[in-house]
Image (cartoon, helix red, strand yellow):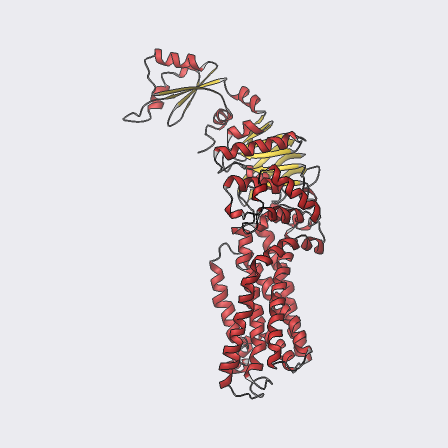
Amino acid sequence: MASQDGLDRLDRATGLGILEGALRQLDYWWTVLKRTWRGGVISSFISPLFYVVGMGVLLGGFVPGDPARLEGATSYLDFVVPGLVAGHAMQIAVGETTYPVMGGIKWHKSYHAQLATPLGVRDIVNAHLGFVAFRIASACAVFLLVLAPFGVFASWWGPILAWFVLLLLGMAFATVIFGISTRMSSEEGFGLIFRLGVVPLMLFSGSFFPIANLGPVLEVVAWFTPLWHGVDLTRTLCLDTVDLPRALVHLAVLAIITAFGWLWAIRGMEGRMRS
Amino acid sequence: MISARGLRKSFGDVDAVKGIDVEVRKGEAFGFLGPNGAGKSSTMRMIATVSPVSGGELRILGMDPATEGPAIRSRLGVCPQEDTLDNELNVFDNLYVYGRYFGIDKATVRARAEELLEFVQLTDKRQAKVENLSGGMKRRLTIARSLVNSPDLLLLDEPTTGLDPQARHVLWDQLFRLKQAGVTLVITTHYMDEAEQLCDRLVVMDKGVIAAEGSPRQLIDEHSTREVAELRFGIADEGNVHEQIAGKIEDLGRLEVLPDRILVYSPDGEEVIAKVHERGLEPIAVLVRRSTLEDVFLKLTGRTLVD
């Protein structure tokens, strides 16, 4: 396995510091942001607002505001908003690490151009993930700010902490999906990720209804979905019903997935670009 | 600048480069000539430190690509075979953003980008989107981009493939100017005219090995004759007419029988044609020309460069 040894040796030859490697790509990602922010505003802000109005306000009008059945929320709107914003963080993360990653590898080949410079694979993955983090953070911040006047948050600090959780949740998905995208030969699999991954998670991870409603077996299944950890933690922070040990478990799960996903993404990119 | 000893590259069971020795000196234009699949691009990718070496030794600018990749790449310019320009950005931003990857400060990279646009004659296109440029302009922009860090060594992988003749000549002119300015060029090509125009020295690669090495002139003198007579005969009812006729003229010089013509290698091509006519043979078209690297390649491998 001479080439595998060579790969490992190239891995170590990263040269630039982590921060330096990412900062050198700031101008590039700034130009990407300048040309994509308009579309981003619509997808990351206007459409979730439709969800909030359609599901939270209008559909929620038919749901009795019983805290015992809504995990402590006094209205369905209060219940569903944290679930929607968590699901939204996931969707942005997946959207930004599927087609754009494939594009960098296969279509516009921006990663190939970047790798001809002193930048290493790790630097390129980090900068792209940094951009995804910015997208998640800004979209979730706007989402939370716009909803604040609706009186859906029990405290001022709850949504601020929730914002960090949403960022972590988003990065858990972003890193893992990034890694998957680097290992895919064509974009056809992305349809599966969305249809069999994102949509079921969105529907059955406690965003729209308490997972207790799933029945005893599926409820246990839901515990093992990353989105549920993010939804539950976001919701308890927004409703001020945090249970500390449970919150720490959620944080640990999301942090471990993110750390694993980050390494998985870098390994995947190395395998793909250094053949 | 580059030194390779027994350099190998394998992809699984396939050996793309099978142990080559190459020495590139400062300031020269060095070429890898060979057909597609000869191992040229694999060699280039190892030199560009984006593909690990499978075996043998490789030193670029005195450094080991396995451990000093970023340091090597900071002094390399790479013009890849396929355009990797950012189609969404304008011409100037492509250069600017790329310069920033090298850690060059903003003011310097702006000034450098303007200079390079002037050099590749794209100043009036500086605000144009890349996707609206012609193929030749894109390639010139790629060359400009590869020069943004003022590299000591410029790698050009099939620089003029896919360009029309006029665009090729513009590009050759620019590469020639770079060479005059002292930049070391390493070029892969499957065009023998390109290799003859640009390269001081080259290796002919075939199936992962080096078949010959030298200056274009040396290679031609060594492996071919001064002139070549090309004879084209009509189409026979049965079999290859050129095969049948070859038997009647094999004493006139070394022959290469191609599907559409016979090449006769001789110091005097006109004399060959006169003798062919004397023997009552009537080719429908004849041509006498100087030997080229294409002939060298044909002699060494029995195949033409562009199949």
- Image side of residue B298 versus residue B118, left or right: left
| The one of B201 and A270 positioned closer to us in this rendering | B201
The image shows residue A241 at horizontal and vertical percentages of: 65, 83
Give the mark count: 0
The image shows residue B153 at horizontal and vertical percentages of: 65, 36
- Which of the 4 image quadrants contains residue B10? top right
- Image side of residue B92 versus residue A23, left or right: left
As drawn, B238 above or below A54: above
As drawn, B6 above or below B241: below
| The one of A202 and B39 positioned closer to us in this rendering | A202
Residue that extends furthest to the front in the rendered view of this protein: B124
Look at 62% across and 65% down and name the residue there. Answer: A171
* Quadrant of the snapshot with the C terminus of chain B: top left
Look at 61% across and 43% down and name the residue there. Answer: B145
The image shows residue B63 at horizontal and vertical percentages of: 70, 40
Look at 33% across and 17% down and name the residue there. Answer: B282
* Quadrant of the snapshot with the N terminus of chain B: top right
The image shows residue A194 at horizontal and vertical percentages of: 49, 65
- Image side of residue A191 versus residue B235, left or right: right
Q: Can the viewer see residue A34?
A: yes
Q: Can the viewer see residue B104?
A: no
